[in-house]
Image (spheres, helix red, strand yellow):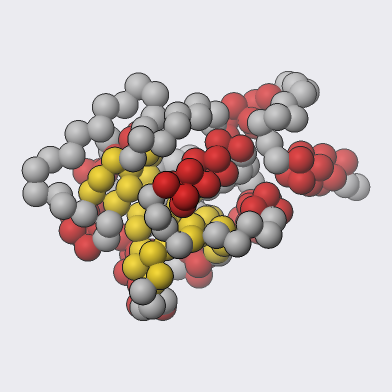
Amino acid sequence: MKKTGIFSGSFNPIHIGHLALANWICEYEELDEIWFLITPQSPLKNRTDLMDDTLRYEMVKQSIGNYPKFRVSDFEFSLPKPSYSANMLREIQKTYPEHLFHFILGADNWALIDRWKDYQTIIHHYPIIIYPRLGYEIHIPHGYPNVRTVNAPRIEISSAFIRQACKEGKDIRFFLPESIRQYIRSIATAP
């Protein structure tokens, strides 16, 4: 059975923090691969600043290039909105039974997990990998054998920071993969 990490998010846009973290988790947590699952609409986030789903998909696809352990997925695009992680995990496991899916989430999301729809299903049926985030302690209650933390490097870059820096015309070339910088520039200047 293939051990596959699910790194789900809006990736609005994807940046080097996402990529470096996924690379570290894939290599040091002995996953066979990581799927970047583009989330159309998180129930806990405002959609007003969200770029088009297809655009975000294309940016992730461009950024992972031909790295053999990364894959981009639009699996959630066909699921009912808003997108709930428990539903997505159930459906993806049914669709790809040859994979053992590990759900990857940050300490910030782990702190809110009890606000998620059917969060107990996620905790008890899927291995969960929690990565550190600045300002968030990770507490795993007793009785959650599928949940573990990783000592991944903290890379505190956010997509909100990237969007704001772009609006301000800042040169943030080292925060984004070059292909994404060029892609964003090409769509910004398109007629």
Q: Is residue 86 above or below residue 106?
A: below
Q: Is residue 93 above or below residue 20?
A: below
Question: Would residue 100 be found to the left or right of residue 15 on screen?
Answer: left
Question: Would residue 169 be found to the left or right of residue 18 on screen?
Answer: right
Q: Residue furthest left?
A: 142
Residue 132 placed where, x, y %? Answer: 36, 33
Residue 35 placed where, x, y %? Answer: 50, 59
Which of the pair 110/191 is nearer the observer? 110
Question: Would residue 67 be found to the left or right of residue 191 on screen?
Answer: left
Q: What residue do we see at 20% from left, 34% from top?
A: 139
Question: Would residue 171 be found to the left or right of residue 157 on screen?
Answer: right
Q: What residue do we see at 64% from left, 46% from top?
A: 51
Instruction: Give the quadrant of the N terminus.
Output: bottom left
Residue 91 placed where, x, y %? Answer: 37, 72
> Do we see residue 36 in this rendering?
yes
Q: What residue do we see at 16% from left, 52% from top?
A: 145
Asked where in the image residue 150 lies, by quadrant, the reply is: top left
Report the number of discs.
Answer: 0
> Do we see residue 167 in this rendering?
no
Which of the pair 184/24 is nearer the observer? 24
Residue 24 placed where, x, y %? Answer: 48, 43
Asked where in the image residue 72 lies, by quadrant, the reply is: bottom right
